Image (tube, helix red, strand yellow):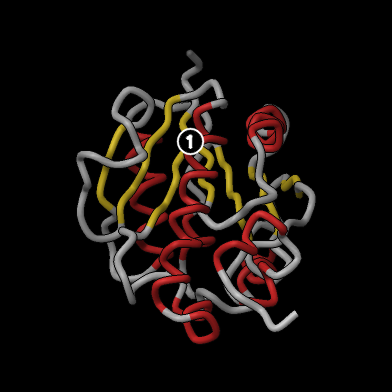
Amino acid sequence: MTNNALIIFTRNPELGKCKTRLAKTLGDQSALDIYKYLLQHTANVAKKVQTNRYVFYSVEINQNDIWSTNNFIKKLQKGHDLGERMHNAFNELLHLGHEKVVIIGSDLLDLNAELIEHAFQKLDHNDVVIGPAEDGGYYLLGMKSMQQDVFKNKAWGTETVREATIKNLQNSNVYLLKELNDIDTFDDMKHYDQLKPFYKTDD
């Protein structure tokens, strides 16, 4: 096992509290079912990556769920906004002695283990690795030492996040992975055949 660390940030899957933009189109139950499907996909992908794996819960740590303690170390997110919570997670794992730390979201069907392994490899010769999302954010962030500014003064959840983050890193070596689509709205998901059982259309 390497001394690297993979962080997965997850929301506790509760009805009416996840994928709210998706729920506006499909309803709370379908949004929850889709989110659970995405979580399972993320867990399956993460288990294939040869690294230390940490899952950080948004509200409370669930003991009996898809994040088996055989494969994942369970922790709780701490902080007032997404930036502060990510900062605290990176800070904790870097202080534990992990040489490279990568965080991924839990709402991408296009994410695979090879891409995450590639991110870790690129940290050999770069300070930061970013996986750009089509909506202007990012689906992956990796670093070897704390980059404080990337977690501050961002309009989280908007299309400005990636550009603002890269601006913070103009004095660092940054590697960009390929752009992927994360699933927040119905338009994001409707071209995935595997998600069609979760909703009904008039076609």
* Place of residue 112 in the rendered image (x, y in percent of width and height, measured from the top left): 66, 38
Among the 4 quarters of the image, the one containing residue 115: top right
Position of 63 relative to 136 (above/below): above
Mark 1 neighbour density, 10 Å: few (under 14) some (14–19) many (20 or more): many
SS label for mark 1: strand
- The residue lying furthest to the top in this view is 1
Q: Which residue is mark 1?
A: 6
Q: Choose between 120 and 147: the one closer to the eye.
A: 120
Q: How far across and how far down the image is residue 168, in percent?
A: 62, 63
Please indicate whether residue 42 sits to the left or right of residue 139 in the image. left
* The furthest residue to the bottom: 24
Q: Position of residue 154 (x, y in %)?
A: 52, 74
Furthest residue toward right: 178
- Near-viewer residue (88 or 30): 30
Q: How many marks?
A: 1
Residue at image coords 53%, 77%: 22
Q: Nearer the viewer, residue 173 or 192?
A: 192
Name above or below for residue 167 compared with residue 22. above
Q: Quadrant of the C terminus?
A: bottom right
Q: Residue at x 36, y 60 (%)?
A: 11
Type of the residue with mark 1: Leu
At a point 44% along the width and 62% down the height, the residue shown is 33
- What is the quadrant of residue 49 in the picture? top right
